[in-house]
Image (spheres, rainbow, N blue to C red):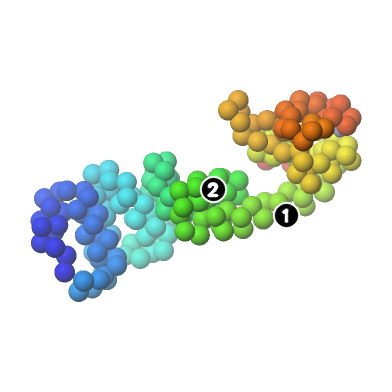
């Protein structure tokens, strides 16, 4: 049973109560039959009042098609709003959309970032997923790097895109040189002889300057 007091609050327009009634219809315990259509209707009321957890739930439903039509664009809109408010469950689902290119252009780096945030607040499974997607990135970047000529030291806001010389290529594949998002923006970080982080503006091997290029540059 949904408590009468909660139902009354929901009917009177209390967004949190509407959300809770929606959850009760999703979970279906305490003698409440699972009814996704009913759940979605209550979530939508709470969404109209700007209640973020309801946006997250409705977003997930638009991914699965439970109680509503499958609509990746709506799912993206709701989940990204909730994710901006640091809702870890929303971040988790949004990350998988970024990984698979559902409702948004695929972006593995964005996926890992969202999963890392979700993992940081202990969202179950997020850390494993972050590692899994990160492994895909590593595989793809090594493959991409190998297909490019040694020419210039080219760097985007998330990765080293192309090497200037063989020693730098090896540094990149071994990840002793990486792009890191710092307070001052993305920077190319290497190591000095003592293993301390060193911001690079040129290649320590051949001296070519770092050139910033767009991420989608074609070679
Ligand atoms: Zn070089």
Q: Position of residue 66 (x, y in %)?
A: 35, 65
Return the mark for residue 116: 2
Image quadrant, ligand 1: top right
Q: Quadrant of residue 209?
A: top right
Q: Are marks 1 and 2 in contact (CB under 8 Å)?
A: no
Residue 139 badge: 1
Between residue 76 and residue 197, name the one nearer to us: 197
* Residue 74 circle label: none
Residue 218 figure quarter? top right
Quarter containing the N terminus: bottom left
Q: Is residue 216 left or right of residue 21?
A: right
Q: Earlier in the sequence, mark 1 or mark 2?
A: 2
Residue 142: x %, y % from top left: 77, 50
Q: Give the SS element for disc 2.
A: helix
Residue at x 13% of width, y 59% of height: 7
Residue 97 seen in the current view? no
Question: In the image, is 20 to the left or to the right of 92?
Answer: left
Q: Residue 59 location, x and y as percent?
A: 38, 54
Separation of marks 1 and 2 at Cα, in angstroms? 19 Å
Q: Residues within 10 Å of mark 1 (few under 14, many from 20)?
A: few
- Category of crowding for the residue at label 2, using alpha-carbon neighbours closer than 10 angstroms: few (below 14), some (14–19), many (at least 20): many
Q: Give coordinates of residue 126: x percent, y percent.
A: 51, 55
Name above or below for residue 142 compared with residue 38: above
Residue 217, compared with residue 10, is above or below; it is above
- Name the quarter where the C terminus is drawn: top right
Mark 1 or 2, closer to the camera = 2
């Amino acid at each position: 049973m949904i408590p009468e007091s909660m139902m009354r609050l929901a009917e009177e327009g209390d967004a949190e109560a509407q959300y809770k009634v929606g959850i009760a219809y999703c979970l279906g315990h305490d003698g409440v039959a699972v009814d996704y259509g009913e759940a979605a209707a209550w979530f939508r009321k709470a969404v109209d009042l700007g209640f973020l957890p309801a946006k997250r739930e409705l977003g997930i439903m638009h991914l699965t098609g439970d109680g509503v039509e499958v609509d990746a664009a709506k799912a993206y809109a709701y989940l990204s709003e909730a994710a901006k408010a640091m809702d870890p469950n929303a971040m988790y689902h949004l990350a998988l959309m970024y990984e698979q290119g559902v409702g948004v252009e695929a972006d593995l780096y964005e996926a890992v970032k969202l999963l890392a945030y979700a993992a940081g607040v202990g969202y179950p499974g997020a850390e494993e997923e972050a590692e899994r997607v990160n492994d895909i990135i590593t595989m793809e970047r090594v493959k991409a790097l190998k297909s490019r000529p040694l020419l210039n030291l080219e760097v985007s806001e998330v990765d080293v895109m192309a090497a200037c010389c063989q020693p730098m290529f090896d540094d990149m594949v071994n990840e002793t040189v990486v792009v890191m998002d710092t307070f001052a923006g993305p920077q190319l970080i290497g190591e000095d002889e003592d293993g301390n982080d060193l911001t690079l503006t040129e290649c320590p091997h051949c001296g070519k300057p770092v050139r910033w290029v767009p991420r989608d540059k074609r070679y």
